[in-house]
Amino acid sequence: MNPLWIGVIGSSVALFALRYSGYLIPEKYLTNPRMLRINTLIPVALLSALVGVQTVTEKGSWVIDQRLAGVAVALVALMLKAPYFVVVISAALTSALLYRL
Amino acid sequence: MNRATASQSLSVSFTVGLYGTAFGAASIAAGFSVLQTCLLSLLAFSGASQFAVVGVMGAGGTAIAGIATASLLGVRNMLYALRMAPLLRVSGFKKVIAAQVTIDESTGVALSQEKLGTEAMKQGFWLTGFGVYIFWNIFTLLGALGAKAMGDPSAWGLDAAVPAAFLGLVWPRLTNKLERALAICALVLAVLLSPVLSAGLPIISTVVLAVIFGWKVRR
């Protein structure tokens, strides 16, 4: 089977299993404060890692290109409290513009 | 039907649903088909996890690495489900539906209605859950078709959109010094490990940092 299909189906099944199990497990098993704290930090770590890898690496090598400028613009947009859409589009337009130059 | 709850649910649904366009386009850019993109939104239905699957696999990661990253991001949905279960008291098929629409936004709106009583909380959960589901899927399709119409998206140099999308997702979570420090450490670690580990693993490895940062009892 095509790996992309495995990714689509596998992540769909995994996510549903996680959610559904939350409705089955008695709450007392998952209220350890340390686990709750780690759980809120996991998305911070993973999403930040994704930002880094998608900005300055390509196929396992470090690459500095138009993406870095695009993400820098996105960062400025976020600091100016721009809505999510503006953040993504301004980054895309910046990288596209530099790529064309 | 509480009008304040309904209007909050609807505005959250529409705003969040709009991001579906960004996902649809990112997924096509990563090499997924329109059908696969739409199935991810219909079945996986969890923004950050969906972006992670297409981000990791689009960068050459294996299916296992993509699924693992998506699942780690999806653990919070399980915790939301735990929180919502005693409120919704659903059983049978309704439990399946409730599970599918248990996301950041439905849980968030439900919890923010606490002052208005349990009925408003339930209403907030269902309206936001269904609302986001509908808009997210419509906009995913539009984003995917739009990206498809452009041909090869990488030829346009629009590739900063994906990391910017992740940056926009993590930004609201950086509310204190510890989270900001973790974000910087995780970013640096993943970039440093990229040349030595196969695609996807540098990202998953940062979970270790989350455990280290979360271990020490604070406050």
Image (tube, coloured by chain):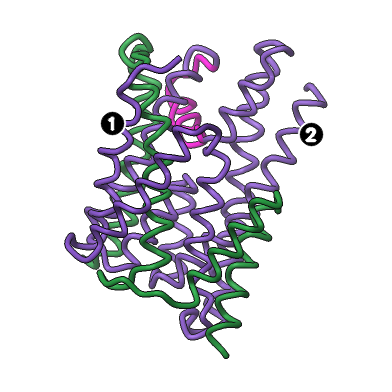
Q: Mark 1 or mark 2: which comes first in sequence?
A: 2
Co-location on one chain, circles 1 and 2: yes
Q: Quadrant of the N terminus of chain B?
A: top right
- Name the residue at 47% across, 26% down: B80
- Chain bearing mark 2: B
Q: What amino acid does circle 2 point to?
A: Ser
Query: Does the magenta-highlighted stretch encompass residue B96?
Result: yes
Residue range (magenta):
B88-103
In the rendered image, residue B111, in percent from the top left (x then y), is placed at: 61, 21
Residue closest to the eye, A86 or A3: A86
Q: Which mark is residue B135?
A: none
| Image height of B84 relative to A78, above or below | above
- Name the residue at 17% across, 62% down: B196
Q: Which mark is residue B212?
A: 1
| Image height of A70 relative to B7, above or below | below
Is disc 2 surrounded by few (<14), some (14 to 19) or many (20+) residues within 10 Å? some
Q: Quadrant of residue A98?
A: bottom right
Q: Secondary structure at mark 1?
A: helix
The residue under label 2 is B7
Which chain is drawn using purple?
B
- Name the residue at 64% across, 52% down: A78
